[in-house]
Amino acid sequence: MRVGVIGAGSWGTTLANLLAKSAHDVTVWARETHVVSSINTNHINPMFLPGVSLDSRLRATGNTLEAVADAECVISAAPSYAVREIATHLFQEIGKHRPPVVSVSKGLDPRTHATMTQIISEEMPGVPVAALSGPSFAKEVSKERPTAVVSASVDQGVAEQVQSLFSTSYMRVYTAHDVVGVELGGVLKNVYAIAAGITDGLGLGDNTRAALLTRGLAEMTRLGVALGADPLTFSGLAGIGDLMLTATGDQSRNRTFGLEIAAGKTVEQIREERNTVAEGVNTSRLILDVAAGVGVELPVAHQVYEILFEDKSPKQAVADLMGRELKPERWA
């Protein structure tokens, strides 16, 4: 199959390489010219996936339309902030034959709060769309460590097509119809991973982490249900699975961000030191607006926002959470 991958970050490159190793005809688009050159000449992506040898059949280009020309499937792996602009641009090429677009980016539109598949559907009318999400560090997939993810689409046939495309001896893909829940799981867990990094950085221990993640999952579920998701989705790979990985794994950008906040760094200092994005930072702003619009309370997420953007002391945030009014445990 001819596949175009838009975005040569760690996850886009990993998925492009997985497909190339499965003998698909894959071209990946990268914005950085040196990344394009390195993939084509040296078969490595030292900027975003260092230490991983890429399949020699994988090609890279700096031209988005070239990447998707005649593609039978398009993988949208660009940073969330760039998805709308890129989707609008690509529609002139893929709108003619409408191949399925698989979104693997995680985030919300800062203006409309739309998910990535909603943005793609808005900018590419008539194009089949699916979301691929779940607990999956790029480096571990690139090393062929057993991994399970979810392919979600309102069209079962499209979900199964994506399932077949990405399934290998080390990548197991399940299908789902709850696109909203699968995408929200991938978005919301980043905020709670930052929170877990903060509490770990403060040395608060295992009890604190367990309580935080359990209540964080409850918040994710409540908001998801209010937005039309199936609550059971948050008990699966795209919910609790992705949350546990991102909140506890050493490779997690969001957990690491929280650790650095606990160490006394500011959001601006951390961003200046990184070439990758911790999506949970911007998401912590957006989900409070979303939650307010549907009347859902997110105590943990609110404290993360105040730490990141209102200079609140992490220790004070913990104290405020522990001092909230006593009440029955509420899940969804």
Image (spheres, rainbow, N blue to C red):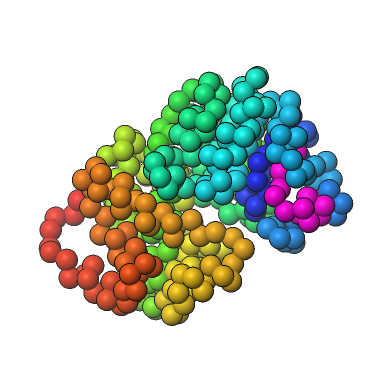
Residues 286 and 38: in front is 286
Q: Residue 29 colored magenta?
A: yes
> Is residue 71 visible from the viewing direction of this image?
yes
Q: Position of residue 233 (x, y in %)?
A: 38, 39
Q: In the rendered view, does 309 fall on the left or right side of 272?
A: left
Q: Residue 179 colored magenta?
A: no
Residue lying at 31% horizontally and 38% vertically, measured from the top left: 227
Relative to 105, is 67 above or below? above
Which region shows up in magenta? 27-39
Q: Position of residue 8 (x, y in %)?
A: 68, 49
Residue lying at 56% horizontally and 24% vertically, measured from the top left: 127
Q: In the rendered view, does 147 fall on the left or right side of 27?
A: left
Residues 160 and 270: in front is 270
Which quarter of the figure has residue 323?
A: bottom left
> Is residue 212 visible from the viewing direction of this image?
no
Residue lying at 44% horizontally and 44% vertically, measured from the top left: 109
Q: Position of residue 253 (x, y in %)?
A: 53, 62
Work out which quarter of the rendered image holds the C terminus and state it: top left
Q: Position of residue 213 (x, y in %)?
A: 35, 59
